[in-house]
Amino acid sequence: MISKNFTKYFQILLYWLTLLVFFFLVSSLIPMLTGYFVSLLTSGTDKHEVFRIFGPNFPRLMSFLSSLAFSIALSLFLWSKILCPIGSISLAAKQVADGDFSVHVPNSKSLQAFCELTDNFNRMVQELNSIESLRNDFVTTVSHEFKTPLAAIEGYATLLQDPSLSEADRNEYTRIIIDSTRQLTTMTGNILLLSRLEKQEIVTGRTKFSLDEQIRQAILLLEPLWEKKHLNLDVDLTACKFYGNCEMLQQVWINLLQNAIKFTPAGGMLSAKLVITGDKVRVSIRDTGVGMDDATMKRIFEKFYSRNSDPNEKGNGLGLSITKRIIDLMHGTIEVSSQVDEGSCFTVILPLEKA
């Protein structure tokens, strides 16, 4: 900051010194020459003699003064329109290179090209600042999410070293350590998957498969979860052949179904519906769970955002982020509607493509 202010004040000082020198030369030379010329005329010197002495040098002198004035004016123009903007951008670029993404270059009234260069530079710094903020938030959140299960593993592993520990307590502590380890494993896998998806722009490995059958398989895969809660199922899936990445879409249905099961109380309803409308397919996963308010719905797809109200329900807030990214890659959309204490409905809309 000190270097920045010093450079700024130095540029201002140099600018005014240049103007001062210019006006000094103009204000000194012209009166001096005029006075000298007048003194010759009023001293009784013959006019012809004055012009004989002074005349031949007058064009040269005026040419020198004109050149001097033009050079100074051109220098001032180049300084204000070109050199000063370049210096500001150069100084700002050095600050960005040092890790300061809060810098902003003022858009001076210089040439159009430099105005555009300044605007582009400021936009670039804003993007870098946003990326840096996201990175810091990501690191902070990941550290926090890892801290809880690691602390549990360390704490209960320490308790297991007590030789007087009962068999029941030993089994309970061992179960908690295993659950925490699985939580870490799942979280690590989801972070790696989301990182890979965010770098991916094109969906590869596309094949033609039965979309309705894939959803049925996902429901059967999660049978232990919905059976444990005695949930009632309502499945209405229209036969649909879909061309896309089978593995990625399987992850979408599993995430949405797990989310619905997690927030639906025992004895509730879970439904899955697939309909084809024109060149699009709509898949709706509906539950009769706790529902969400408007504030929660706005953040539901954010990374690491978790709405767990039950401490026994494990989650890392990445499932729906992964789901949305996969759907975006497939040029689809996902919509959510919900009412508190009535349930939620996630609707996925995908374009039907021919193989």
Image: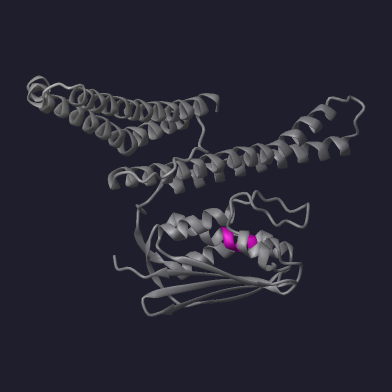
Quarter placement of the N terminus? top right
Q: Main secondary structure of the magenta part?
A: helix
Q: Is residue 178 visible?
A: no
Q: Is residue 319 left or right of residue 201?
A: right
Q: Which residues are magenta?
A: 255-259
Residue 73 horizontal side relative to residue 318, left or right? left
| Number of residue marks | 0
- State yes or no: residue 83 in magenta: no
Residue at 11% across / 28% down in the picture?
59
119 vs 96: above or below: below
- Which residue is pictured at 34% across the width and 59% down the height? 207
Q: Which quadrant, please, contains the C terminus? A: bottom left
* 154 with respect to 241 (left or right): right
Q: In terms of depth relative to the viewer, which is nearer, 111 or 346?
A: 111
x and y percentages locating residue 189 in the rendered image: 55, 42
Q: Which residue is located at x 78 percent, y 56 percent?
A: 310
Pick the residue in front: 91 or 286: 91
Measuring from the top left, give residue 70's x and y in whole percent: 22, 33
Q: Residue at x 87, y 37 (%)?
A: 169
3 shown above or below 149: above
Q: Is residue 202 above or below residue 334?
A: above
User: Taking 39 as reference, is 133 above or below it?
Assistant: below
- The front one of 127 and 30 is 30
